[in-house]
Amino acid sequence: MHVLNGILIVLMATLALGALFVLYCRWRYPEPHLNWSEIDIESIKFPADFLWGAATAAHQIEGGLHNNWSEFEDSRGLERSGEACDHWNRWQEDFEMLSELGLTTYRFSIEWSRLEPEAGEWDSEPLQAYSDMVDNLISRGIRPVVTLHHFSHPAWWEDRGGFAKKENLPHFVAYCERVFEALSDRVEVWCTINEPIVFSSMGYTLGQFPPGHRSIWQTLRTMRNLMRAHSELYVSLKSRKPDACIGMAKNVTLFDPLNRWSPVDWAVARLLEWLWSGAWLGGIRTGRMLGSRISGSKGSLDFIGLNYYTHFLTGLFMPTTGELSFAKRENEVLTEFGYPMYAEGFKRAIDLVSALDVPIEITENGVADSKDVLRPDHLRRHLWILSEAIGEGHDIKSFHHWSLMDNFEWAEGYSMRFGLYEVDFETQERTLRKSGELYRKIVKEHMKI
Ligand code: GCO
């Protein structure tokens, strides 16, 4: 009888603790949903010096690359990036599109495999081409923002283990230093690494990005090494040019419980959000990440680049293989990528990275929308949220729409279309979408020149 009583007491206590945990989480982590029909999303205000831009990445637009991604595409039978947007040969006409939109900032990445196709063999021509791109942007009154690693790197470096092995980091730092030496006389704003958590979780947990591994331990090791690489870079580049503006492009995806009454769903959501963002933010704020001290990481940011797209509704049975399937709230619409449009989360993401107390650059925000039916609303809602955040005092310097043009969307190939310009990949013709015209109009209205 005593055993039964004991079990009942433990059960009651567990239920009580669970209820208290849920009540605390519902209070601490609200999930706002606005009634957008009551909001004048055209009433937006931006500072006179706010910078309007677009973002791209080398492997997604340049074409003709041989690197970790092209080998992964082949080995997994994925749609090949191939010629992509043929941007390597068309960058002058593509930069004309930046001017056509009236943009004043442009984020792009350098392709390491072009500069160092084999270990220790440097090719100066591609670096000269990137230098010409920088000069062209500046001549157009467009601020270049350079990303040094955007998911792709040389195949030889991948074969050595890439970021999963600490002993490989000096190769990466040496490549970055070489680019920095060549461009930092004209490029002031640098993103060391794009979305370290996406790179490590997709490559080492879910196995949908190179090297296609599925190991929590390798994921955690890679996350720490990415922070090490960023920190070493920050120290090195700042020592070479103290007034350089060095940051990182951080993807903030929010994790909300599918059932807001479920202690289990809450526990999963909080754990995932901590792994996705909390651990990394902690590394920058304290110099310690995932149980390790990361030398030089504390305060290693002059700005934080924020890539925001959505929130994931989580529960115990989150899919971890094959296509990620996404749930949505009743009032939400799904993008073509499958996850919901949730502009309200943009403010939550801004509040999250504001804790770092450095200026914010919106380095990516956009929507997979081949028919251009969602993008106008998506653009206006996210810019309204941004305008409100700036009005509240957040120091947000720029907005880089993802993306200038349709491009290679990693494991999704060319099925996801994020461009302000539609690309016909048969003819490489670029066509400005209606949402691109809208963005151009918004930029024009807010450019105080
Ligand atoms: C990422 C990258 C971009 C994507 C974009 C759309 O988040 O994966 O930074 O390369 O193309 O976010 O998914």
Image (cartoon, rainbow, N blue to C red):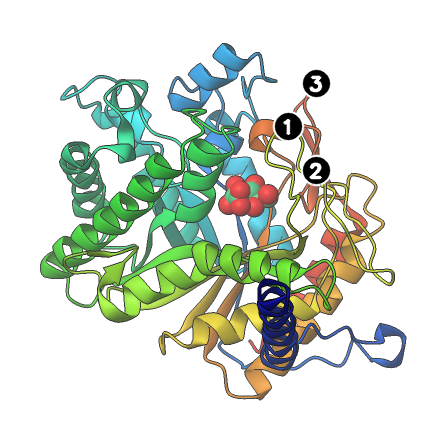
Disc nearer the start of the sequence (2/3): 2
* Residue that badge 2 annotates: 417
Measure how far apart labels 1 and 3 are at the Cα level: 29 Å
- Residue type at mark 3 is Glu
Q: Nearer the viewer, residue 438 or 390?
A: 390
Query: Residue 426 shows which numbered tag?
Result: 3
Looking at the image, the residue that sits furthest to the front is 1
Q: Is residue 65 left or right of residue 444?
A: left
User: Which residue appears at 78% of the width and 39% of the height?
Assistant: 370
Does residue 291 sit above or below 385 in this rendering?
above
Marks 1 and 3 in Cβ contact (< 8 Å): no
Residue matched to label 1: 322
Left or right of residue 41: residue 385: left
Q: In this view of the protein, which residue sits in the foreground, 320 or 109?
A: 320
Q: Position of residue 259 (x, y in %)?
A: 74, 61
Circles 2 and 1: CB atoms closer than 8 Å: no
The residue tagged with tag 3: helix, strand or loop? loop
Q: Quadrant of residue 22?
A: bottom right
Q: Residue 299 carries which label?
A: none
Front of the two marks 1 and 3? 1
Mark 2: which amino acid? Arg
Work out how far the residue at label 2 is from the one at label 1, CA to CA, in angstroms. Answer: 21 Å
In the picture, the quarter occupied by the N terminus is: bottom right
Report the label total. 3
The answer, for residue 329, to whether it is visible in the render is yes
Residue 78 sits in quarter: top right
In the displayed structure, 418 sits above or below 102; it is above
Q: State the image coordinates of residue 55 (x, y, percent, origin top left).
A: 52, 49
- Name the one closer to the observer, 326 or 119: 326
What's the distance in space between the residues labelled 2 and 3, CA to CA? 15 Å
Q: In this view, does 300 lie above or below 424?
A: below
